Amino acid sequence: MQLQKNAIMNILTDYSWLGVLACAVLGMLYAIILYISDKKSQLSPKARWIFSVLRCLSVFMIGFLLLSPLVKISSVETEKPVVVILQDNSQSIVMTKDSTFYSNGYLQKFNDLKKSLSEKYDVEVFSFGGSLQNGFDGSFDRQSSDISLALSEIHDIYKGRNVGAIVLASDGIFNAGTQPTNLTDCTFPIYTIALGDTSVRKDAAISNIKYNRITYLNSRFPVEISIKANKLSGKTRRMTVENGGKTLFQKNLPYSSDDFFTTENVMLDADKPGVRQYTVKIEACEGEVSTTNNVRTFTVEVIDSRRKIALIAQSPHPDVGAIKRCFESVETYEVENFSADDFDKQPSLYNLIILHQLPSDKMTHNSLVEKVMKSQTPVLFVLGQQTAFDRFDRLQTGLAVNLRSNRCDEATAAFNSAFPHFAMDENTIRKIEGFPPLSVPFGKYRKSENVQTLIFAKTGNVVSEMPMVAFSQKNGTRYGFVVGDGLWKWFMDDFRQNSTHENIGTLMEKTAAYLSLRLDKEKFRVNAKVAFAENEAVTFESELYNDNFEPVTDGNVIISVNMPDGKTSTFASEPRGNHYYTSAGTLPQGSYTYTASAKAGGKKHTKNGSFVVEKLCLEQISLTADHSLLNTIAGKTGGYMLPPQDMDSLPQLLDQRSDIRNIMFSRYKNMELINWPWFFVIIVVLLGTEWIARRYKNEI
């Protein structure tokens, strides 16, 4: 941010100017007594007057400092408008017939535009693919495009700033995130530069594959494969699904039109446990603009058991139905719904028990809660207005609530970035923080040291220390807490925005996975995903315990990754909270195995595992630029769409706008004069000059 400043300084004091006059009189009296009235001095009259002035000034300034004066600095600052250039840096830009232009001539025009705009505006440059980055390196190598995320983050970064406009240079192709035309929060115009090629060329592509990442041994699981073909009418090509070089499914696809699209539903057998990678292929036709999008891989983890959940509710409630539907849609879990009056099974039969609005004031319900607690089965408490908090506090789970009234506060979610037990995707966090508020019981919340908060309650713009989602552990059993009524609103809002329950589902799944994981007696544990995207960092989280099963963070954890070419790379871990974090960076496509080793207390522990890195070919799926999308974005925000050949006219278009102008504002700053070093320098110079002169005159 560039500012032009004009500053004015004023000196203020809490005393009247009579105090300043007294300091001046004191200085003069001191000088008169020391020099003027001294009859024995051999100094000439002129020297006496010079020494008197020096002493008078130094005494005056020392006395003035005792009045505690303030220097008030007022400045008028002029802030130039900010123009943000947001450049699409994804691969699809250069995968066209104009690739030479974008690798050379366009970069020159881009730099010329930046230089021209800088003459009048404060220009800041960002680039994006799947994420937003400072600057633009002209590489065009990002493997995905998320326009909505880039615009959203720019809006957050420059909220409250004097933003004149955003210049979005893109081909309009997005393959990640939400629809970028949803611009309800945008407060400044967006000018778009339409890059890429809008012509439709010969190409067939696997546009999407839908599947469940986890399935179960000896079951059949569905895979939905979407295929599109342009300008290939009359051709017939074979589609296959393979695993380990073996063809599991094949079918001939006749391209019946130049705008062909079909969805094939395939059932595959989960006949072996472990991580299984499958490859979908369609035969290429002569003249296709790209054949890399004819092949895609996906990974499925085959496991041989499901986690059972008992959902026990005090009474019917819309939150109960929402929670039940969430887990029913995930194969990993098998959920059973009970009324608290009807539950007659052994809690130990379940991996997780969800108690909704329990304990209550009913004796039979509380007996049930005590039975669940004695079984040492992990419990997720969903607490709200019907919960008997006095009885809940007696359970000593680590969280206690002292209600102050029967009223509730409306609170939204605010995630804790320092939560140590599992990570949430930034996009998911942002979506959940935008969900409607929950009704949170009003009271004083007390947490023990072993309670870790994932989500804090946010009232208005104030983030409190009150937990909305938290976890604790006692005697080897994990407990979770969701505080608030209205989870059903989160499910509905998630579906309204995204047509799925993916975001709230991710939160519930991670919560259930953490709670239902039995605390085994192994002192070294390694957690890692079974599949990573090609542009995603491969990370591991490890836990190390001593003989008392207390977390150890001063050990040495090393992870060796065996590459597909037979080489081995070793990565060190760093402590983060109660666990160790290891990053192997991004790795090429392929299947990998790893060995994790740890040393603590003179003992060595090892763990083995495997994962795959899937090829990311999102940018090759569609190469036809969507300029209508860019025109819609510009039109909705009051901007304008330009071809790259006319981008040098953008400064003139911005100059014509009356709403893009400099902003002038005043700033005031008070500083105690005693903290101003130059004031002391002046006093030292005055006294030093007087001393040196007197020494020279032999008056000392």
Image: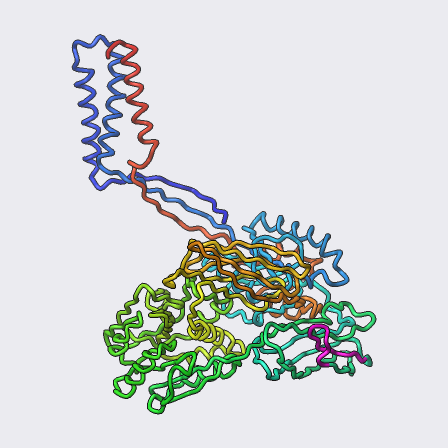
Kindly report the secondary structure that dominates the magenta region of the rendered protein. Answer: strand
Name the one closer to the observer, 220 or 222. 220
Q: Residue furthest bottom?
A: 342
Can residue 255 be found in the magenta stretch? no
- Percent from the top left, x then y, of residue 556? 47, 54
Vertical comparison of 284 with 224: above or below:
above
- Percent from the top left, x then y, of residue 389? 27, 77
**Is residue 236 in view?**
yes
Residue visible at 36% across and 73% down in the picture: 479
Horizontal side, residue 335 vs residue 361: left or right: right
Vertical comparison of 46 with 446: above or below:
above
Name the one closer to the observer, 692 or 586. 586
Residue visible at 42% across and 82% down in the picture: 350
Q: Residue furthest top?
A: 42
**Is residue 158 in view?**
no
Can residue 240 be found in the magenta stretch? yes
Name the one closer to the observer, 229 or 17. 229
Q: How is the model colour-coded?
A: rainbow
For the C terminus, the quadrant is top left
- Percent from the top left, x then y, of residue 102? 71, 56
Horizontal side, residue 550 vs residue 556: left or right: left
Counting every numbered tag in the picture gives: 0
- Quarter of image, res 227: bottom right
- Read off the magenta span: 236-249
